[in-house]
Image: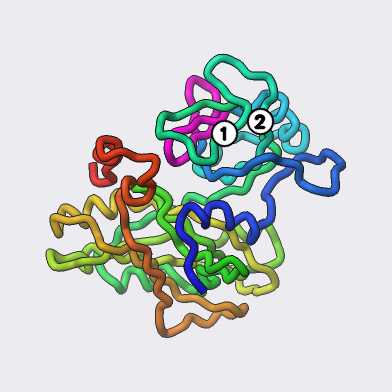
Amino acid sequence: MKKLNVLAWVCALVMGLSLTSCLSSGDSGYGYEDLRTVYVRNYLGSTYFEDVVGNKFYPSASSLAAFRQNDPDFDLSDYYMLIIYYNYVEDETEGTSTKADKNPAYTPQSYNIDLMAYQVIEDLKMTVVETAAEVEALQTAPVIPMEQYLSTGIIGPEQFDETNIVAYTGFYMANDADKLKEHTFQYAYVRSEITADSKDLVLYVCHNRNSDDKLEAHWSTYCSFNVSSAVAYFKSVTGNLPENVILKAKTSASATLTMPDEYSEYEVEYKTMKELYPDWVTDEDDDNVDATE
């Protein structure tokens, strides 16, 4: 099966996930017009969404209030990246449109929306270590494989922009939400592995279960791996951007506490924004979003 390209992946991943939060409207289905992977932005106390090429999406106060009715602690500013499911607000206002062009010019547009549901993309912590032995100390249990096989292709780790690689992953745990707090899930790169001759940047995905020794359920989600500082360090040593980013993880498709002897490797070709989105990003724009700056 072919691996889906990044734009197809953004659309297809909805097939493999459940909604983290949705409105209790009484409807049997999820009524939304569009979905998009976005960053959460905050400005002067207001929260809005921005997609990878700069289009902005402003959620209506009424749609946010509906979420707060179900969860008084609901706060969009808690999140870094989301997949949003939304309807367009019918009434046009200056500078907005009722429908986002599926293939817009790079000139960013603004849209008013009703937020219907969202899926969190977890922002994982990155750790920098000096030796491979330190990586081993960060992990005590495997993670689930970082690829999903769908009828449309394989959803594996993909570069989303010059900063973020997004991947599906997770781990087994006790069937107890409070136990989730005991798990440490992070990624790391090893400084000593990066030399002047290095071609690829290696990131290790590390799961430490701490005192949770149960395997009754599994926690899984989409995660973002912010590679900007690692890429900057790589360039400072080699003088070049990496050819590939390789995610290495000790994986198991079954529930087990036994760590595999070998790592599974997931290779992602590292690209500039112009290479990722040639129809949206100009050479000048690409220079302005260099991850190594």
Quarter of the image holding residue 126?
A: bottom left
Q: Secondary structure at mark 2?
A: strand
Residue at the spot 52% in from the left edge and 51% down from the top edge: 122
Q: Is residue 244 above or below residue 18?
A: below
Quarter of the image holding residue 64?
A: top right
Other residues around mark 1 within 10 Å, as few (<14) / some (14–19) / many (≥20)? some
**Residue 280 left/right relative to 241:** right
x, y percentage for residue 290?
26, 43
The verdict on residue 10 being magenta is no
Residue at the spot 25% in from the left edge and 35% down from the top edge: 284
Residue under pointer 1: 100
x, y percentage for residue 264?
43, 76
- Labels 1, 2: front one: 1
Other residues around mark 2 within 10 Å, as few (<14) / some (14–19) / many (≥20)? many
Q: Amino acid at mark 1?
A: Ala
**Residue 275 left/right relative to 94:** left
x, y percentage for residue 193?
22, 68
Q: Secondary structure at mark 1?
A: loop
Q: Amino acid at mark 2?
A: Tyr
Mark 1 touches mark 2? (CB < 8 Å): yes
From the viewer's side, name the closer residue of 31 and 166. Answer: 31
* Region of the chain picked out in magenta, as a range: 41-57
